[in-house]
Amino acid sequence: MAVITEAQLRICAHACITRYDRGEGDVATIIGSYVLDEQQRGQVLEIILSKRSDLVPSNVEDSSSGDILNEQEETVPWYSSIFRKKTV
């Protein structure tokens, strides 16, 4: 897993908030859809909660939906790997 900067984590957190506001699912599922390790997921969650205190931790459950994706070898730039195009 490539090292992701603080700015990249903030971008991911804001993307998660946007997707949540659009009704694409709960926060845990949205975070789980990105290729992030557990530490990075925790950091993204902290940023989300600092921006949106209405998304309390009790509403955010751990999601394993991204576990399969996280086991893949990263061979593309970070932005291509975590921001996957949603298919219908």
Image: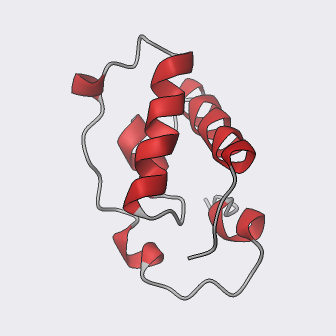
Front residue of this view, candidates 51 and 34: 51
Tell me: 18 left or right of 69. right
Question: Could you say where residue 44 lies in the image, as x and y percent from the top left?
Answer: 51, 42
What is the quadrant of residue 46 in the picture?
top left
Q: Quadrant of residue 10?
A: top right
In this rendering, position of residue 74 left or right of residue 35: right
Q: Position of residue 85 (x, y in %)?
A: 70, 61
Quadrant including the N terminus: bottom right
Q: Position of residue 68 (x, y in %)?
A: 38, 77
Q: Quadrant of the C terminus?
A: bottom right
Q: Is residue 74 above or below residue 41?
A: below
Residue 57 in the image: above or below residue 61: above
Q: Is residue 61 visible?
A: yes
Instruction: Name the residue at the top extreme.
Output: 54
Residue beneath the point at 63% across and 46% down: 9
Vertical position of residue 25 compared to residue 29: above or below: above
Counting the numbered discs, the total is 0
- What residue is at 77 percent from the left and 74 percent from the top? 77
- Asked which quadrant contains residue 84, the reply is bottom right
